Image: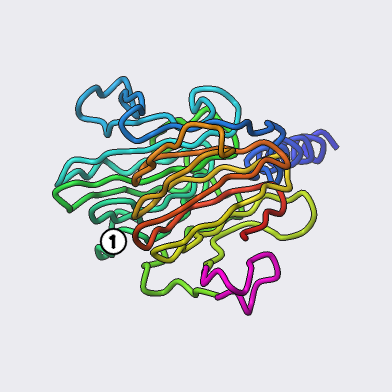
Amino acid sequence: MKNILTILAVTVVFASIKITAQTPTTDSVKSVNEVVTADNVEWGWLNPLRGDKSPAAGELWGDRTKNEPAGFLVKFKKGFSPPPHIHNITYRGVVIKGLLHNDDENAEKQWLPAGSYWQQPAGEAHITAADGEENMALLDIQEGPYLVKPTSEAFDNDERPVNVDKTNLVWLNANDIQWVSEKSNVQTAFLWGSHQKNQLRAALLKLPAGFNGKIKNLSPNFRAVIISGEITHQFSKKDTKNELQSGSYFGAEENATSIISTAKETILYISSNGDYEVK
């Protein structure tokens, strides 16, 4: 009887760990109207214990050292390839510059160019390598802190890694999407999450050159990062215009409208806890 109870207790412990490791599907931290231009990003080390042997990290929203949602930029030097490791939480990444590889240490290199997407599940051993002259990515986490741990602590949280080269993205036009004006020539590629009510989701939004329009946030959370190209952004015609290049970020509170224009084709990464409209 004692052995049975011990087994049951161990099972309960592992079940608790598994549940804890699941990535949140909602975001309890409401976004606010804010702008971070690429040249105003504050940089530090992604792994302070390794100093300059670590990639550089620049905060966009949230705090990756706390248990909260966060988005941050990561810069990798050419040839960077760390020892195999795990992370305690799941993260999603979009390549902004260069070539990045994220996979098992024994996997053949699959270099993801700018505009590509990957997902690294909590607990799974991997490496992230870089091969471009300049390499930068956006990382998006729904919980924290973001930690690097040895492979001896690996675990399975039932999520699976994803690597999507930009050439494999499926772009939908306005005729396929209810929340995009048919006259806008805007396209979108869905990346992750659920479109059920109040569920987190993320997509790439491709704005054509010469776009002049608005994005209205209808949810508690709206966060956008410029992946390529650039936009002119303001929250109202009375506000100061900000020129946002790749690596820049803007957040919007619920029911806020962003006025946006482009001189060339631009791709935004948008994560939200609900709907938004593009007009």
Tell me which residue sits at (27%, 39%) in the image.
75
Tell me which residue sits at (46%, 61%) in the image.
211
The quadrant of the image that shows the C terminus is bottom right
Q: Residue 191 at x, y = what percent? A: 54, 61
**SS for callout 1:** strand
Pointer 1: residues within 10 angstroms few (<14), some, or many (20+)?
Answer: many
As for residue 185 lying within the magenta part, the answer is yes
Q: Relative to 168, is 188 on the left or the right?
A: right
Write down the residue under mark 1: 113
Magenta stretch, main secondary structure class:
loop
Q: Relative to 114, is 241 on the left or the right?
A: right
Tag 1: amino acid: Pro
The quadrant of the image that shows the N terminus is top right
As for residue 147 lying within the magenta part, the answer is no
Q: Relative to 88, is 4 on the left or the right?
A: right
Q: Residue 155 at x, y = what percent? A: 53, 45
Q: Residue 41 at x, y = what percent? A: 36, 28
Give, as a single range, the part of the protein colored magenta: 173-187
> Which image quadrant is residue 17 in?
top right
Tell me which residue sits at (58%, 45%) in the image.
258
